[in-house]
Amino acid sequence: GRKVYTRFFLRDFSVFDIDEESSVPPMRYSDSVYQDEFGLEDSANILSVSIVSSDVGFPVDVYGRVIARDSIDYKCIYLFHRIRDDCQHLNEDGMLILTGPYRGLVLVDFIYLEIDLKIREEGVPDRPFSKGLISIDGRVLSREKDVMVRSETLESWLSTTEVRFTTVLNAVECTFEIKLIEGLFKGNITVGIADKARKLDNEQTIVIHDSTADGVVTSDESGVIKLRRSVITICLERNVMFRINNEAAGVCAERTFDLSPRRTGADELEITCGAGKFGFRVVWSLMDFRL
């Protein structure tokens, strides 16, 4: 008996295509000259989108899309996008494999998340699984903590969906790419936010590569490690921390390292972990759309 919003709305659609993808790229201001007093924008990192309950049980084959919109242009930024022939097989953990956002999200007033998921079923018509609109309100952010983990839930159709995210005050964009320079890589890589004492909060970590689903990488090929996601945002008072687990060639190894953020510029470094040598490139950028 309730009315539920399912899509973002603008009164004047004559100048706005609701299905148009955002063309604003990452790393827009990585080379910009700025003044010290220049303000930084607040942001949010989408940590996970999970089906926490299902009226039809598990496992289920899910397809559809999850879209983010921010106040830079309010256009579509895909977090999850699969067609019917490329469903994700969801087990009881219910976690969708996110592949976005491809740039940092700006939280000036709201970030909107549109969820539209369906179930693929053999022999019967596909059914809506989760559909609705979640908003992250940047107008009510506490200024007491620079990073805060929060969650919102959506009850609709045949499921309950939970979105976990961090709000980040005065953030910069961190974009990264990773290559395997030598050896073999079979394992996973996570990225997260740590305090200045280099203590990582596991609630704020994101898996950016998992060889079980994403494939084993060898340096004999291109060496490029395909990342599920390649951007997070972070405040200048915290560190970005990477953790590599490499189980290739019968050797189990773990390596953790962190980087202090900057407003602009880039860092490059080589890290050895087990049977592989990895090359990291991290680019820092302002996100202010008024520049």
Image (tube, helix red, strand yellow):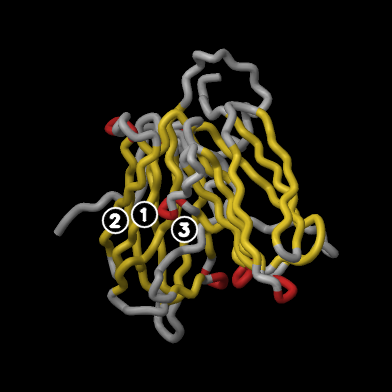
**Of the numbered discs in the image, which one, if any, rests on residue 163?**
1
The one nearer the camera, 117 or 49, is 49
Query: Toward which corner of the image does residue 94 lie, by quadrant?
Result: bottom left
- Amino acid type of disc 2? Thr
Q: Vertical placement of 229 versus 284: above or below?
A: below
**What amino acid does circle 1 point to?**
Val
Q: Residue furthest bottom?
A: 123
Report the residue at 32% width, 54% height from top.
132
Find residue 287 and report its horizontal and vertical position in percent.
53, 29
Q: From the viewer's perspective, is 184 left or right of 144?
A: right
Q: Residue furthest right?
A: 220
Residue 46 appears in view: yes
The image position of residue 122, as x and y in percent, is 45, 84
Which residue is nearer to you in this view: 129 or 36? Answer: 36
Q: What residue appears at the point 38 percent right and 43 percent down from the top-left corner?
A: 112
Which residue is labeled 3 in the image? 65
Q: Which residue is mark 2?
A: 153
